[in-house]
């Protein structure tokens, strides 16, 4: 726990308390890549145990500003894990059908099944970011959504789901460089949207919205972790380490074998 303590967000914290360029887990690139490979193998082993136990689930929530690396983090951290035991759900702008229902309606359909790791690329927290920055929610509505999210996550934890929430914290200058890199590389231009620049103009408003939502929803059962994301390799190491730590804390045990199975000899 002590190694990750510095990344835990408490309700009295501010985002400025966390350096997006910090790399305390990274000595050099070669050893960092080797460690990430070890983490990937360990995650595969632990996911097998989670599946074999067949009772509990893990929900990994990844939030962050544009270019903070949610896609890349998923790709590298879970590079060795069986796709049969890991699912990824991206949260885009709500559809007309989704907007016609409560904002958590679309979340219930994609919670993890028993024995499964579910990764949310963005999440229900978009509904405490986009409308808040747009000014389309009254203060009372914001407080209601904060409480509803806390109740939703409590429901998940009480029914066997461990919730791990990571905010990939990127600096403004690093984001500028990554957006420019997308524009300059013909093979990456498909990732760029003109709307990304409009969101970037609202940088301070989004940082404030993130800070407030984390202050309101970092709870003992589902705390927030702020992951420095300026360095991609270090970002992946921290997320992988948090997932491993979480799975190990669950003390996973496979379901009991059939009686006498150890005596069976296959002919």
Image (tube, rainbow, N blue to C red):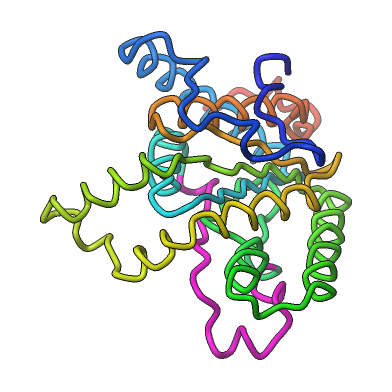
Count numbered badges in the picture: 0
Quarter location, residue 129: bottom right
Q: Nearer the viewer, residue 97 or 42?
A: 97
The magenta-colored residue range is 83-107
Above or below for 265 versus 26: below
| Membership of 101 in magenta stretch | yes
Outermost residue toward the left in this view: 186
| Membership of 98 in magenta stretch | yes
Which residue shows up at 37% across the image and 14% down it?
34
Q: Position of residue 259 (x, y in %)?
A: 81, 30
144 sits to left or right of 5 = right
148 sits to left or right of 181 = right
Which residue shows up at 50% across the image and 23% down it?
22
Which quarter of the image is occupied by the N terminus? top right
Q: Nearer the viewer, residue 47 or 155?
A: 155
Quarter location, residue 17: top right
Which residue shows up at 72% across the image and 55% down it?
213
Q: Position of residue 76 (x, y in %)?
A: 39, 35
């Amino acid at each position: 726990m002590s190694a990750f303590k510095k990344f835990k967000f408490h309700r009295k914290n501010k985002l400025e308390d966390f350096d997006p360029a910090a790399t305390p887990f990274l000595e050099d690139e070669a050893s960092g890549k080797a460690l990430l490979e070890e983490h990937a193998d360990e995650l595969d082993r632990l996911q097998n145990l989670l599946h074999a136990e067949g009772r509990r689930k893990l929900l990994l929530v990844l939030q962050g500003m544009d270019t903070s690396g949610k896609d890349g983090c998923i790709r590298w951290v879970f590079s060795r894990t069986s796709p049969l035991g890991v699912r990824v759900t991206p949260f885009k702008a709500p559809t007309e059908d989704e907007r016609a229902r409560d904002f958590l309606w679309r979340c219930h359909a994609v919670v993890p099944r028993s024995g499964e790791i579910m990764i949310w690329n963005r999440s229900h927290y978009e509904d405490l970011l986009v409308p808040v920055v747009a000014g389309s929610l009254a203060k009372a509505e914001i407080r209601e959504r904060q409480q509803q999210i806390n109740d939703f996550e409590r429901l998940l934890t009480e029914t066997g789901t461990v919730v791990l929430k990571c905010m990939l914290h990127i600096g403004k200058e690093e984001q500028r460089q990554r957006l420019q890199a997308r524009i300059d590389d013909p093979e990456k231009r498909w990732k760029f949207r003109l709307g990304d620049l409009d969101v970037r103009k609202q940088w301070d408003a989004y940082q404030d919205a993130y800070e407030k939502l984390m202050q309101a929803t970092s709870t003992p059962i589902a705390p927030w972790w702020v992951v420095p994301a300026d360095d991609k390799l270090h970002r992946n190491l921290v997320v992988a380490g948090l997932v491993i730590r979480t799975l190990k804390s669950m003390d996973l045990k496979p379901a009991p074998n059939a009686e006498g199975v150890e005596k069976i000899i296959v002919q």
